[in-house]
Amino acid sequence: MDLAKAIEQAADKAAPSLWTKFAYGFGSVAYGTKDAGLKYFLLLFYSQVMGMDSRLVSLAILVALIFDAVSDPIVGYWSDNLRSRWGRRHPFMYAAAIPVAVSYYFIWIPPSGMSEFAMFWYVVVLAIVIRTFITIYETPSTALAPELTDDYDERSSILSFRYFFGWFGGNAMTVIAFAVIFPAFATAAIENGQFNPDAYERYALLGSCVIFIAIMVSALGTHSYIPKLRAAPPKRDMTLGMIFKDIYQTIAGKSFFALFIASLLAFSASGLSAGLAFYFSTYFWGFTPAQIGAVTFGVFLSAFLGGALAPIVTRKLGKKRGALIVGLVAFVGAPMPIFLRLIDVLPPNGTPEIFWIVLVTQTIDVGLIICYQILAASMMADLVEQGEQATGRRSEGLFFAAATFMRKFGEGFGIVIAGFVLSIAGVAAGAQQGELSEDTLWMLGAVYVPTILILFLSVIAIVSLYDIDRAKHEETLRNLAARKSAASNPK
């Protein structure tokens, strides 16, 4: 095989079909549904509905995160090296479907009469099970992106589908909860169905079904692509120490660690924001369930905005520069309405103006954050060839295991921070809407704004150290094609 032919074959993979993009992207509905539930509702459900100390809920999530640190790289490495008639990725996707769905259902159905201590361990065990099996699905599934195309621009397009469906699916579950499920469980004793534990059983059943369907649609929809995907590398006898040495050699590099740390901080900020989102909507802004549903519905528009904007930014600005510009605008804008309320320049609660201000600013800001996330994920995909050039191994699973870990750990750690923010602000467990004092609500905002700004602005500083652009990526592809050509035609 000559060099020209090697490059031509690489170009042939540049444009997966629309159906392939759809099936690949639709799989993230599973992660989005799980993510929306654990980020937006878990802390509120166990603290305000079940009466568990918010710090214990946060601690349970933190314990589960420790297991992620071990399971994620192992699953990524395993999926890079698996040999099966269904390729490297799909056996994991199929195997995870039922365990993820079942464990997600039961985390919302704690047995009655549990002590707070027993409830803590209930959350710990199920959080570990959910996170482990979502890793077994999400890491191999997401790792398909750099296998589907080597093209710098096309990767942002493919990952736009992934992030669009992740946000769209997760947000759909939230909208359904506020528009349909919670109102159906409002009673004379519990006027807001959001605080009725029976509502969460219905939510759990629907969510677990959506997760199962999304995983199966994505796995089956991309199944025919298996023969076109890369085969596992030659088998080697490996010890556990050699495996972790391989992992380190693959991901070592300034660009990876810059993106890794920046993404951990960005997802921590996202988790903090999500963990407190309904606290702010319910207590700080005093919105009704219908208004919360409308604000949440705006995220559908955000998903379209972010998904459409990312490929354009990639083409016009490049991924790193685009991420810096879009990220800075989004990150500074995220806490701005809360800051403006703290300095008392916004209309009072209960007026139409405050509802529309929050709705419009959040819709635009979330769209920009989604755009930033797509660009960061596409930057991670471009690291695959850098790793291959350095080690001779193709390790999509490892890189996207790191991406899965960053997302899960960051967002989970953000919820941990949220629990302590609530504690510092003095938000009592079990408090209903209207029961928090003005001083408590002011303190909640005053602690939240600087915390999330420090996290977000640190992201901008660190991601600036990433050094792969379009020219460097294309040079790497040429080097790899030349190496492949030389191996096929030894002199």
Image (cartoon, grey):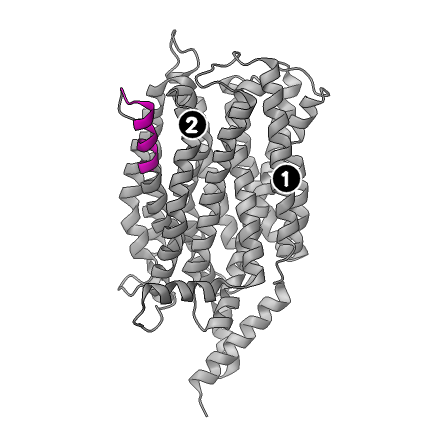
Would residue 463 be found to the left or right of residue 194 on screen?
right
Q: Give the quadrant of the N terminus.
A: bottom left
* Relative to 330, residue 280 above or below: above
Count of numbered marks: 2
* Relative to 344, residue 398 above or below: below
Residue situated in front as seen by the camera: 293 or 98: 98
Find residue 65 and report its horizontal and vertical position in percent: 41, 43
Would residue 97 be found to the left or right of residue 48 on screen?
left
* Residue furthest bottom as drawn: 491
Task: Indicate which disc, 2 or 1, sits on the residue closer to the N terminus.
Answer: 2
Q: Is residue 173 visible?
A: no
Find residue 208 and report its horizontal and vertical position in percent: 32, 35
Stretch in magenta: 113-126
Q: Counting other residues with Cα less than 10 Å from the Cα at mark 1, is it few (<14), some (14-19), or many (20 or more)?
A: few
Amino acid tagged 2 = Ile
Would residue 263 be found to the left or right of residue 24 on screen?
right
Q: Residue at x 61, y 63 (%)?
A: 468
Residue situated in front as seen by the camera: 451 or 391: 451
Residue situated in front as seen by the camera: 348 or 435: 435
Q: Counting other residues with Cα less than 10 Å from the Cα at mark 2, is it few (<14), some (14-19), or many (20 or more)?
A: some
* Relative to 219, residue 57 above or below: above
Secondary structure mostly seen in the magenta stretch? helix
Q: CA distance from mark 2 to mark 1?
A: 33 Å
Residue 23 among magenta residues = no
Find residue 111 and report its horizontal and vertical position in percent: 26, 24
Find residue 411 and report its horizontal and vertical position in percent: 48, 40
Residue at the spot of label 1? 454
Q: Is residue 31 visible?
A: yes
Callout 1: SS: helix
Residue at the spot of label 2? 176
Callout 2: SS: helix
